[in-house]
Image (cartoon, helix red, strand yellow):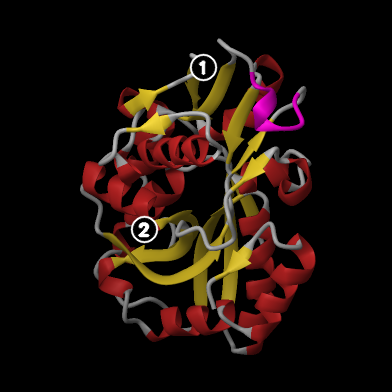
Amino acid sequence: MKKSLLTTIGAAGLLALTACGDSDASGEELSEDQLRIGVTAGPHEQILEKVQEVAADKGLDIEIEVFTEYVMPNIALDEGELDANSFQHTPYLENFRNERNLDIVSVADTVNFPMGIYSEELSDVSELQEGDSVGLPNDPTNGARALMLFEEAGLITLEEDAGTEATVNDIADNPLDLNFVELEASQLPRQLNELSAATINTNFAVEHGYVPTEDSIFIEPEDSPWFNVIAVREENKDDAVIETLIEAYHSEEVKQFIEEEFQGSVVTSW
């Protein structure tokens, strides 16, 4: 199965992809035996490769497109370059869809990647010192998730009604006067050596060689509500091939693979 790496990032790449979108894909029912699905590199890619195997036994041919950031998979889906994607949780999808007026929807929960706090110099969040710099993703939903994790770790207190829309402006109490550095999520592992600690999404942590359950100094509980989803264009949500995809993803074979491969760092929804 062909696998290509789409690494185009930024305004120029976004315009190029928008210009070359496959207009024939819009408004039509998808093929019953083939899908092109976008994922981010790392665990999502590994899991979809297993889904690909299971789907093949059901007569479904899956082509995997691998991305290195969170923006292009949704743009590519909306423009018809992809038939589905699997890389994001619901709050991110909802925010992205509303901000860019995209006609894409969730059709199934998949897995949860508990976000962790990592450090190259500390072994526990209690070792953070006054004035230390800590990193977090700069996109709205993952940034809010990171702030909620910092709060759960006892480092800050957020305004009571901040919730999943929290920003650094919603920090009500910051006893250590921590300096919050907002970076693109995929850059946080690369910049960790310049920070005292940072919240890193599991897919990017694994991609950089971290084992979340072993290397994080604080991690979300397994019952965290931030489950990831399969997204498709609105007009294709009821297509038979999407149901086949969901059946393959929610199979016992895929569940067993996830449990054995990730040892609790990735949690299934079924």
86 or 119: nearer the viewer = 119
Q: Is residue 83 magenta?
A: no
Name the residue carrying label 1. 178
Residue 217: assigned label: none
Q: Which residues are magenta?
A: 122-128
Where residue 73 sits in the image (x, y, percent)? 45, 50
Residue at the image point whose x is 69% and y is 57% from the top: 265
Q: Amino acid at mark 2?
A: Gly
Q: Is residue 219 above or below residue 133?
A: below
Which image quadrant: the C terminus?
bottom right
Residue 84 is left or right of residue 235, and the answer is: right
To which quarter of the image does residue 82 belong?
Answer: bottom left
Residue 102 is left or right of residue 68, and the answer is: left
User: Does the rendering let one see residue 190?
Assistant: yes
User: Does the rendering let one see residue 33?
Assistant: no
* Of callouts 2 and 1, the N-terminal one: 2
Where residue 240 sits in the image (x, y, percent)? 39, 86
The reply to whether dot 2 and dot 1 touch (C-beta < 8 Å) is no
Name the residue carrying label 2. 80
Q: Amino acid at mark 1?
A: Leu
